[in-house]
Amino acid sequence: MRAGMASSGSLTARLLSLYSPCAASAAAAAHSPAQLNFVHGRQTIPDKSTGGPEFDVVNPATGGLLCRGQASGAVDVQAAVKDAREAFEGSWRGLSGSERSQFLLRASAIIKERREELAVMEVKDTGKPVYEARMDVDSGWQCLEYFAGLAPTIAGQHIQLPGGSFMYSRREPLGVCVGIGAWNFPFQIACWKSAPALACGNAMVFKPSPLTPLTAVALAEIYTEAGLPPGLFNIVQGDGETGQLLCSHNDVAKVSCTGSVGTGVKVLQQTAPRIKPVTLELGGKSPLIVFSDCDLDNAVKAALMGNFLSQGQVCSNATRVFVQRSVCERFLERLLDRVNAIRIGDPQQDGTTMGALISQSHLDRVLGYVQRAVQEGAKLVCGGKKYVPEDPSLKGGFFMTPCVLAECRDDMQAVREEIFGPVMAVLAFDTEEEVLQRANATDFGLAAGVFTKDLTRAHRVIAALQAGSCYINNYNVVLMEMPFGGYKMSGFGRENGMATVDYYTQLKTVYVEMGDVTCTL
Ligand code: NDP
């Protein structure tokens, strides 16, 4: 056995036992650092002497400690990258796409079988309602199946050239790719990064957010159970420093990071000295434009889906809702009815439609934005307050009521900056030309939407919007077939869809001479 490796049973089972209120050892286990790294097909204990600080993993719905983690340092990063490189250079890179796809299909089947336990684990880690966590798990296995289907189709080109010569191209894997995840969709992000990386013939070392370290480890375990050769999907837990060690490691060929713009800038700086390709899925302040001729009920539903899923902690959210002045009042009335029907509470309960924000400090930050918006002249239509559920076990949770701000202006801080919480800003507009100018007046460019029954206007407006992921008469629909990613400071590169293959492979072109060499010297 390698140094630092533990041989206990299923990590998923062990992690779940930490969550079980009747597990006798739960309290004791919660206070000792969990073995959350995963290298060479096994859980590993982070190296204490070179590691960073220990961190608490907290259940956002209760404020209680789930377990403790240890940030990985140079020794763990080196071990994980070296192991991934050996796995990549072993048989993996030489397999055909259809051979690789079999591992993804088997892993997808296991995820489907474990849907409920994975969802429960994700709820404990994130505070999101269980019905949403199930959707995230579904998005995970759908991603594995999509890229399993795509893997056998990854191909180059053959082009006939003058004189019988020809060229062909090969789509080759990059090597060891690093995935860095945010805390809002931990399992989904781990799937969205690992599935295309593996389908394209790469290995991946993944670093989850220290706030939500659990389900990525469960995914690693599932890949192992599916027979994926050890080392192809390794996990190192840690903070920004761990991420930096991964980004700047000489044997890392590519980095895909989901996070804030600030982190995206750092990742670019860290990868620049080695000219590494990077995919950045960053933040947003996306516009939803509601014209007066639209189906208003659908627009209201889309605004809800575009603001309050996962407690508003969604990068693509339409947090600037521009409503044509003539229907603004009606829009707000119908919106208020539906917002009032949102059921905040225990995220493990099926009927709950809004859970807890990720941490106390994030809750304070979001509430601060609401307070300043009101000071700047926004009208608080509803919500924006800390919420304490009746259930005594949830008293320590990080809940707030969903907030709608009306009479907003473009210069308000809450309208300019990404809040990343359940706060919708409603802005009235008069003309198409005006709203386009205002919608585009941001450094972000992740997503955008338009509601109208006027077909030509819908396409004209979408063509003029500066955003990577756009919607007509809907919002925040995420499907594996649709490439997802941003314009401007929301990042570059794409996840999902066939476009992803371009970001996890490199293209080699080969000229083949069929005649004599023409020499002009
Ligand atoms: P952060 O940017 O704080 O962190 C993202 C990840 O990067 C974390 O794992 C973090 O670790 C790590 N990290 C921090 N510093 C570095 C570094 N120097 N080098 C490498 N990695 C580093 O984002 P959050 O986790 O707070 O997530 C919220 C943000 O993510 C929002 O802005 C949101 O819009 C964006 N996001 C974008 C999505 C998209 O697809 N476009 C989807 C989901 C979220 P640590 O936490 O320890 O700092």
Image: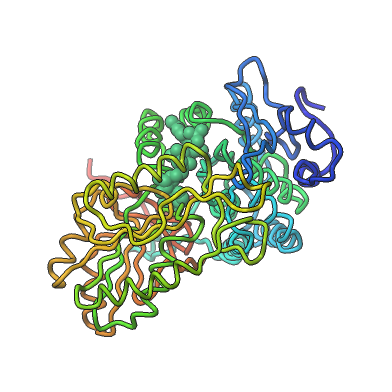
Q: Of 467 and 514, which appears nearest the observer? A: 467
Name the side, left or right, on which 326 lies relative to 150.
Answer: left
Image coords of residue 476 (percent x, y): 43, 66
**In the picture shown, does residue 159 fall above or below 454?**
above
Nearer to me, 292 or 62: 62
* Rendered residue at 61%/47% (across/down): 61
Q: Is residue 11 above or below residue 79?
A: below
Judging depth in this view, the residue of 124 and 164 nearest the camera is: 124
- Count the marks: how many? 0
Q: Is residue 430 above or below residue 225?
A: below
Query: Residue drawn at (28%, 85%), measured in percent from left and top?
Result: 453
Q: Quadrant of the N terminus?
A: top right
Q: Quadrant of residue 117?
A: bottom right
Q: Quadrant of residue 472?
A: bottom left
Q: Residue at x 42, y 60 (%)?
A: 484
Q: Position of residue 313 (x, y in %)?
A: 46, 52
Judge left or right: residue 65 versus residue 270.
Answer: right
Quick check: can you spot residue 142?
yes
Q: Position of residue 419 (x, y in %)?
A: 37, 48
Left/right placement of residue 387 relative to residue 302 reads: right
> Which of the two residues, 436 or 511, is positioned nearer the viewer here?
436
Q: Quadrant of the C terminus?
A: top left
In this view, 217 is above or below 145: above
Query: Which residue appears farthest toward the top when viewing the image?
Result: 49
What residue sits 67% from the left and 21% below the top?
A: 47
**What colouring style does the render use?**
rainbow
Image position, residue 296 (x, y; %): 34, 80
Q: Is residue 255 visible?
A: no
